[in-house]
């Protein structure tokens, strides 16, 4: 049985290239739609876990009306904690705006803060302004505090009535200042499903 093809936003491959992955895709979809807490994917490098997460996010973007999929890939080229936190927060806001508009274009254009304010759905205005306030504290003397504030956005979103399914990819590239376990512990304080 072929998997249904969705518009590629994050995925790099066509769905029919995901041979033998239907059960994993279904499990991740179920977790994103119905579960609470985290799901940790352990794998050897280069076996397709990133693509698997990207395929699931694309399907959620196309089919969900209530759960906002947010995909973030840690990048060792941006290992400085403030830059990682800022990238995460901007990506989070961008994907929220794109989902609410049912248009992936903002994800491809990487809008700045003024444009994100304009793109935000009116019901998300409070959350967006709170997040922009966190970003304005980027020059804080405390990089760990800033990073924690950024990675607590899923908790803040849920508290604002925004249901999120968070997919964190390549967590081994997270800044040395905060461990994968610390990120998982922080996210576990809320009800948002997450996969890392």
Image (cartoon, rainbow, N blue to C red):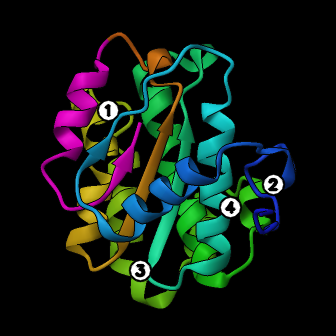
Looking at the rendered structure, the secondary structure element under dot 4 is: helix
Percent x, y for residue 116? 60, 67
Residue 186 falls inside the magenta stretch: yes
Judging by the rendered image, the residue that carries numbered circle 4 is 58
> Dividing the picture into quarters, in which one does residue 112 lie?
bottom right
Can you tell which of label 2 and label 3 is closer to the viewer?
2
Residue 80, above or below 91? above
Q: Residue furthest front?
A: 1
Q: Residue at x 21, y 31 (%)?
A: 145
Percent x, y for residue 155? 23, 58
First in residue order: circle 1 vs circle 2: 2
Q: Pointer 1: residues within 10 angstroms few (<14), some, or many (20+)?
A: many
Can you tell which of label 4 and label 1 is closer to the viewer?
4
Percent x, y for residue 110? 72, 52
First in residue order: circle 1 vs circle 3: 3
Distance from the alpha carbon under mark 2 to that under mark 3: 35 Å
Viewer-side residue, 22 vs 105: 22
In the picture, measured across the screen, residue 61 lies left or right of residue 153, that is right
In the picture, measured across the screen, residue 181 lies left or right of residue 154, that is left
Judging by the rendered image, the residue that carries numbered circle 2 is 15
First in residue order: circle 4 vs circle 1: 4
Which stretch is magenta? 177-196
């Amino acid at each position: 049985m072929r998997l249904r093809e969705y518009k590629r936003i994050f995925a790099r491959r066509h769905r029919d290239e995901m041979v033998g992955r239907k059960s994993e895709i279904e499990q991740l979809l179920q977790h994103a739609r119905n579960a609470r807490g985290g799901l940790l994917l352990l794998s050897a490098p280069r076996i397709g876990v990133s693509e698997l997460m990207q395929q699931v996010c694309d399907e959620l973007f196309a089919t969900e009306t209530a759960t906002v999929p947010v995909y973030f890939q840690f990048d060792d080229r941006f290992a400085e904690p403030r830059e990682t936190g800022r990238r995460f927060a901007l990506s989070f806001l961008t994907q929220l705006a794109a989902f609410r508009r049912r248009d992936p274009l903002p994800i491809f254009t990487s809008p700045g803060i003024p444009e994100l304010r304009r793109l935000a759905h009116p019901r998300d205005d409070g959350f967006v302004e709170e997040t922009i306030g966190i970003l304005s504290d980027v020059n804080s003397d405390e990089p760990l505090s800033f990073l924690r504030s950024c990675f607590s956005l899923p908790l803040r979103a849920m508290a604002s009535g925004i249901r999120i399914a968070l997919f964190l990819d390549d967590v081994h590239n997270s800044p040395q200042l905060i461990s994968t376990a610390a990120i998982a512990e922080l996210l576990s304080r809320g009800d948002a499903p997450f996969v890392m």
